[in-house]
Amino acid sequence: MTYATSPVNDVRQRRWWILVLAAVAQLMVILDVTVVNVALPSAQAALHFSNADRQWIVTAYSLTFGSLLLLGGKLGDLFGRRWTLVGSAAGFAFASAAGGAAQSFGMLAGARAAQGAAAAMLAPAALSLLNATFTRPAERNKAFGIYGAIGGSGASVGLLLGGVLTQLLDWRYVMFVNLLFAALVVLGALALLDNQAPANKPRLDTAGAVTVSAGLFGIVFGLSHAETTSWSNPLTIGCLAGGVVLLALFGWIEARAAEPLLPPRILTDRTRGASYVSVLIAAASMFGVFLFLTYYLQRILGYDPIESGLAFLPMTVVVVTTATVASTRLLPRVGPGTLVAIGMLLGAAGMLYLTRLGLHPSYVSDILPSLLSIGVGLGLIFPTVMNNGTRGVEPADAGVASATVNTSQQIGGSIGTALLSTVAASATSAYLSSVHGPVRAAVHGYTTAFMWSAAFFAAGAILAAVLFGRAKPATATAVAQAGQAPGRATESRRPLVVLRSSEQQDADGPTPPPRRAA
């Protein structure tokens, strides 16, 4: 007598493959924020573009990514996650191939912009897929712990990968490597998912899409322009002011639209709103360690690209470990507000420790403790805010809620990069005007940026404690009441199977496998 494979176990197994699919997509999007940084000098020498043009290779990606995220999230809700993942991953691959084969500055910058546009659809589709697949609290916490670890460590992975590819192969491979990631996403989406687009597609909120995309573009461009010019530059002021006005207009439109691009109910939930604010602050703060510590390691200590990437490796390991433990063991007990606030405080402590850096530090005693503290902090913050930033939304809103998380992270990173770059440059100039030389002045600029990053983290701890309040993770009962059946395996290629909640399984015992004739 034999037993067939339980359909319940089959669906559960495919859930974890869906997590792998979403994780690969997220890793590709996040590491491409930083993977080109260490390759830029080599690309500049090969394509003969100026120092003034160099920053556009980074900015082109962030401009299209940040400004199109909400629209990309909505398109995923309208057309289904399967084809959104396939189309955006394929677009990312084509853009990466064009960038790797670039023969001019314009071709490379255009490829980076196209990468950003594809990422704006890919990132929210991956996160909303995770949100729809994992609805049982225990499994959801574990899945978001892994996914959040990638969000918190992907930038440092990008630095290491970029250094290895540039130093051992060629700068073009930082673009070509995306072909492998994109192929895995396309094949995984085709194998694992059915396309579950709504039967009656709502009209796209065109006015909202135009105003929010233009507003976000203005803010990201203004922040990038301030980094390379000044905050008093007329173009900087005009872009930032125009962006704020357009976003205000977007809010007015959404409050009156019959089918808004960003339904106000997504933002008015206290826990979700607190998550969006927290991820913005964390992203602004963490760029202090990635950007300026990289400068410090390479320009002051003389590290090569691979050594710089390896220096961040302990932090990456700590982020991954902490994120998994925090999501599965701590979040169900203490709630999101406590975890995020503690994570922010650990980030602040790590940044403050970096302000002690001088000309001849010891990596083990002067740098490593900071990276470990910041790594634990990011491991507490990112899975928590990604989990709670998408919890409880209706299926039709999952993509745009996921896009809001990513938008907050992207805008926070742009604010952090621009503001901290300005602070560091001003501190360096002021220090250089006295009796100190350029090297000491540069170190003073970096440590000043670390101080500001610590202040951002500290402010984030206070806001997290206030905004989250006493919010705790939803139980299986609360998930069911929110209209999402616990354990429902959405986006599955095989017939959907409704799994019993963990509470029911504990009471009823394990599900016996169905018999078939011997």
Image (cartoon, rainbow, N blue to C red):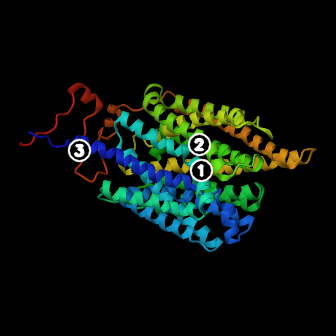
Query: Residue shown at 23%/41% (left/top)?
Result: 8
How dense is the environment of label 1, judged by Cα within 10 Å: few (below 14), some, or many (20 and up)?
many
What amino acid does circle 3 point to?
Val
Which residue corresponds to mark 1? 160
Using the rendered image of the protein, determine whether residue 398 is visible from the camera's viewpoint. Answer: no
Query: Residue shown at 69%/48% (left/top)?
Result: 294
Q: Give how far apart the Cα atoms at labels 2 and 3 are.
A: 40 Å
**Number of the front mark, 2 or 3:** 2
Q: Who is closer to the viewer here, 30 or 321?
A: 321
What amino acid does circle 1 point to?
Leu
- Is 244 situated left or right of 140 in this image? right
At numbered mark 3, what does the secondary structure look like: helix, strand or loop?
A: loop
- Is 252 situated left or right of 446 in this image? left
So how many labels did they put on this image? 3
At numbered mark 2, what does the secondary structure look like: helix, strand or loop?
A: helix
Q: Where does the image place residue 72, in percent across and percent down from the top left?
A: 47, 58
- Mark 2 and mark 3 lie on one chain; the one further toward the N terminus is 2
What number is the disc on residue 497? 3
What amino acid does circle 2 point to?
Leu
What number is the disc on residue 408? none
Q: Give how far apart the Cα atoms at labels 3 and 1 are.
A: 41 Å
Q: Which picture quadrant has residue 220? A: bottom right
Q: Where does the image place residue 217, in percent across and percent down from the top left?
A: 60, 60
* Residue 250 versus residue 435 in the image, above or below: below
Which image quarter holds the N terminus?
A: top left
Q: Who is closer to the viewer here, 220 or 436?
A: 436
- Whether pointer 3 and pointer 1 mark residues with C-beta atoms closer than 8 Å, the reply is no
Query: Residue shown at 41%/36% (left/top)?
Result: 141
- Whether pointer 1 and pointer 2 mark residues with C-beta atoms closer than 8 Å, the reply is yes
